[in-house]
Image (cartoon, coloured by chain):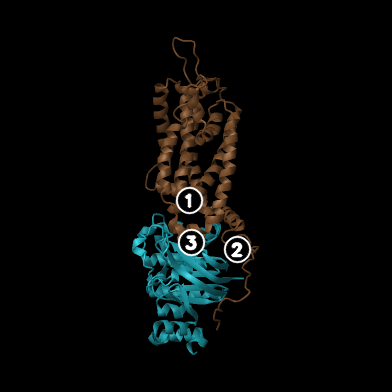
Chain colours: A cyan, B brown
C-alpha cells in the first residue's frame, strides 16, 4: 500500500554560520520561513504540516519562493525527518530535485543513469536492462557516453526523468526544474508520467506553470510561509493562489486535452 | 475526484514503534531516534552494497581520469615513498636495509589506510552534501563508500609489499634484529625477531579489525564533524603529530633496554599510549615476521568495541539530523 501520512510535522533548520546580530530581529517576510531568535538561529521551514496522500493522488504544490515547497517535497521524500511530529512514507520514492545536484558532472550520462538507479533501490542488472529504454526515451543517443558536464539543462532533465520514470517508482516527487525541456519532449514525458501515476503511483509536483499543473495534477496544496494555506481541487486552490481562474489563461488545446482526460475537473 | 483528506485520523498510533518495515523503504515510520531506525539504516546500506561499491570505484577512477596509467599511480607513489624512506632512515638509524625496507613499506601501507579513514572519515558527510540533501538514502552508504575507497587504495599498495617481499625474502625468513650491532662493543641492541612464518596470516584478521575500526571512526567523526566544522582542521593537524609519534619510520626496538626510570624507559611506555601504535603493530608484525605481544590485540579489541558503541549511539541520536547539518 503506497501512502504518505504526515501529522503535525515541522522542519526547523539550525543555521550555525549565520551572524546572530544580523538576524536578531525575528524576521517574518513574504519570502522564506520564520527565523527565530535563539542562540543558534532556526529557520522554521515547515510548521505543523498535516497531510495524507494515497496511491493515485496527483498533487500540485504552489506558493511563493521560499514558502516551503521544496522542503515539503524533501520531507515527503524522506530526506528530512520532521523535527517535531511524524512522517510515515510507504512506497518506493523517486525524487527529482534541482537537476544540477546529485549528478556527477565528470562522469558519463550512462554512469549517472546507473548511479541514480542504484540510489533509487535498483540493482545493477535491473539498470543495465533499462539502459536501452532510457536511451530511447531521452533521445540522447551517443551523448550518453559523454561526461554530464557537456549536457544542457534540458538534456539533464531528460536524463533524470528517463531514470525515474523507467524504474516504476511508487511515489514520484518532482521539483520545478523540469520546465527546462522542449515542448515535444514534454509531451512524451507527460504521457509517461500520467501512465506511471495511473499504475498505482503517486505524484507530488511543485511548479509555477499553470500548463504543467493542469497537465499532471488534479489536486493542489498552497504553501505559505511554511504552512499549508489551502488544500483541495487543483482549480480552486490555484485560482485562489493566483487570484484569477486557473483555466482562463490556458490554451484551448490544453483545455480540450485535460477535458478529455479528466472531465470532472474541466467542468466543475 | 479524490481530494487528499486532511490527516486521516487513526492512520497510525504515534507510539507505534513496531512498524512493518519490510527490508527498506518504509524506514520513516518510527521515531527518528530509535535503535530500530539506526540498525535499519545499516541493514539497508548493506543491502545497497552495489551502490557504494560502485561509488567507491568511481572515486578512484575519478581521481585518475584522463591519466594514462590511472590508478597505477597509487602503487608507484607508494613504491617511491617506501624506497626513499626505507633507504634514508635505514642509514640514519643504522639499520639493515633488508629488514628495514619491508618494515617501512608495511608501516606506510597501513598508516595510509588508517589516516585516510580518519581524515576522509571526518569529511564523509560534508563531501556527500549534494547527495544527502537530494536523494533519500541510508547514511551508512556514505560511510561504506568512504571506507571501501580506502580499501581499494590499500589493495593497490599490497602490490608494493609483494615486490619488497620478493626482493628481501632472504633476510626476512630467518631470525633477525632490526638494529645493527654497535661496532666495537658486545652490545646487540634490539630483540631477536623470529622471522617470517605462517603467522603472517594473522595480518588478515588484523586488517579486518582495522577496517571495522575505520567504519566506526568514519561514522562517529563524520557525524561530529558535520555538526562542528572545526573538527576536520583539528584532526588534520593532530594526524601529523601522530605520524611522528607512531613507529612507522622508526622502530620501537630502538627504545628498548632503558634502565627502569630512565627517560628512555619512560618514552617507551608513553609510546604505548598512542592507539595508532597498536593498530599498526597487529598488522605489521605478522607481515615482517616480528615478535609481537598480545597486548596490542587486546587494546585494539577494546577500542573496537568502545568505538562501535559510541558510533552506534551517535547514529541512533543524530542520524536524522545529518541532513539538516550538511
Q: Which mark sits nearer the N-terminus, 1 or 2? A: 2
Residue beneath disc 2? B30
Which mark, by number, is residue B224?
A: 1
Q: Where residue A230 sits: x, y (%)?
A: 48, 80
Q: Residue B35: image x %, image y %? A: 61, 56
Residue at the limit of the structure toward the left, as seen here: A22
- Per the rendering, the mark at residue B132 is none
Alpha carbon separation for disc pair 3 and 2: 20 Å
Q: Nearer the viewer, residue A15 or B167?
A: A15
Judge depth for marks 1 and 3 and give the one in front. Answer: 1
Residue closer to the observer: B232 or B176? B232
* Pointer 3 chain: B
> Could you tell me which chain the residue with mark 2 belongs to?
B
Q: Please state which of residues A111 and B42 is positioned toward the viewer in this rendering.
A: B42
Q: Measured from the top left, where is residue B235 in percent x and y?
A: 43, 43
- Distance from the alpha carbon under mark 1 to that under mark 3: 22 Å
State whether residue B172 is above or below residue B35.
above
Q: Is residue A130 visible?
A: yes
Residue under label 3, please give it. B135
Circle 1: is it few (<14), some (14-19), or many (20+) Cα within 10 Å?
Answer: some
Q: Are marks 1 and 2 in contact (CB under 8 Å)?
A: no
Amino acid at each position: 500500500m503506497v501512502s504518505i501520512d504526515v501529522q503535525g510535522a515541522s522542519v526547523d533548520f539550525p543555521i550555525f554560520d549565520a551572524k546572530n546580530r544580523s538576524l536578531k530581529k525575528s524576521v517574518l517576510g513574504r519570502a522564506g520561513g520564520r527565523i527565530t531568535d535563539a542562540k543558534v538561529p532556526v529557520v522554521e521551514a515547515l510548521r505543523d504540516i498535516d497531510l495524507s496522500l494515497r496511491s493515485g493522488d496527483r498533487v500540485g504544490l504552489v506558493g511563493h519562493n521560499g514558502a516551503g515547497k521544496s522542503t515539503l517535497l524533501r520531507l515527503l521524500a524522506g530526506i528530512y525527518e520532521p523535527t517535531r511530529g511524524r512522517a510515515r512514507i510507504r512506497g518506493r520514492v523517486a525524487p527529482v530535485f534541482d537537476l544540477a545536484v546529485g549528478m556527477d558532472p565528470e562522469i558519463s550520462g550512462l554512469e549517472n543513469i546507473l548511479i541514480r538507479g542504484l540510489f533509487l533501490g535498483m540493482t545493477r542488472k535491473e539498470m543495465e536492462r533499462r539502459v536501452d529504454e532510457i536511451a530511447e526515451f531521452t533521445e540522447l543517443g551517443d551523448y550518453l557516453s559523454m561526461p554530464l558536464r557537456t549536457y544542457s539543462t534540458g538534456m539533464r532533465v531528460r536524463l533524470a526523468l528517463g531514470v525515474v520514470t523507467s524504474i516504476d517508482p511508487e511515489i514520484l516527487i518532482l521539483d520545478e526544474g523540469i520546465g527546462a525541456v522542449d515542448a515535444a519532449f514534454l509531451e512524451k514525458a507527460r504521457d509517461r508520467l500520467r501512465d506511471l501515476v495511473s499504475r498505482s503511483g503517486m505524484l507530488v509536483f511543485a511548479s509555477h506553470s499553470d500548463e504543467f499543473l493542469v497537465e499532471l495534477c488534479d489536486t493542489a496544496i498552497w504553501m505559505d510561509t511554511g504552512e499549508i494555506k489551502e488544500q483541495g481541487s487543483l482549480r480552486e486552490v490555484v485560482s485562489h493562489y493566483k487570484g484569477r481562474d486557473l483555466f482562463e489563461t490556458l490554451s484551448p488545446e490544453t483545455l480540450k486535452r485535460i477535458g478529455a482526460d479528466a472531465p470532472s475537473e474541466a467542468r466543475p | 475526484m479524490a481530494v487528499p483528506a486532511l490527516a486521516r485520523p487513526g492512520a497510525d498510533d504515534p507510539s507505534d514503534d513496531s512498524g512493518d518495515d519490510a527490508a527498506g523503504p518504509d524506514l520513516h515510520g518510527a521515531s527518528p531516534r530509535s535503535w530500530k531506525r539506526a540498525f535499519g539504516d545499516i541493514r539497508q546500506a548493506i543491502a545497497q552494497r552495489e551502490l557504494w561499491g560502485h561509488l567507491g570505484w568511481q572515486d578512484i577512477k575519478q581521481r585518475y581520469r584522463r591519466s594514462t596509467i590511472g590508478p597505477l599511480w597509487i602503487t608507484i607513489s607508494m613504491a617511491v615513498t617506501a624506497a626513499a624512506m626505507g633507504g634514508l632512515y635505514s642509514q640514519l638509524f643504522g639499520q639493515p636495509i633488508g629488514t628495514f625496507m619491508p618494515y617501512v613499506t608495511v608501516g606506510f601501507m597501513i598508516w595510509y589506510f588508517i589516516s585516510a579513514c580518519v581524515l576522509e572519515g571526518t569529511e564523509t558527510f560534508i563531501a556527500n552534501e549534494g547527495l544527502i540533501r537530494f536523494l533519500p538514502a541510508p547514511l551508512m552508504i556514505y560511510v561504506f563508500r568512504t571506507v571501501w575507497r580506502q580499501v581499494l587504495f590499500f589493495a593497490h599498495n599490497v602490490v608494493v609489499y609483494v615486490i619488497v617481499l620478493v626482493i628481501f625474502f632472504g633476510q626476512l625468513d630467518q631470525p633477525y634484529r632490526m638494529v645493527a650491532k654497535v661496532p666495537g662493543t658486545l652490545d646487540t641492541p634490539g630483540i631477536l625477531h623470529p622471522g617470517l612464518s605462517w603467522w603472517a596470516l594473522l595480518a588478515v584478521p588484523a586488517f579486518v579489525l582495522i577496517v571495522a575500526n575505520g567504519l566506526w571512526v568514519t561514522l562517529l567523526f563524520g557525524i561530529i564533524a558535520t555538526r562542528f566544522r572545526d573538527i576536520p582542521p583539528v584532526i588534520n593537524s593532530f594526524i601529523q603529530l601522530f605520524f611522528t609519534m607512531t613507529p612507522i619510520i622508526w622502530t620501537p626496538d630502538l627504545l628498548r633496554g632503558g634502565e627502569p626510570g630512565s627517560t628512555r624507559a619512560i618514552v617507551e611506555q608513553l609510546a604505548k599510549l598512542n592507539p595508532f601504535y597498536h593498530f599498526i603493530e597487529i598488522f605489521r608484525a605478522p607481515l615482517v615476521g616480528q615478535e609481537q605481544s598480545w597486548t596490542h590485540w587486546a587494546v585494539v579489541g577494546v577500542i573496537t568495541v568502545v568505538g562501535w558503541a559510541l558510533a552506534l549511539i551517535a547514529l541512533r541520536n543524530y542520524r536524522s539530523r545529518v541532513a539538516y547539518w550538511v
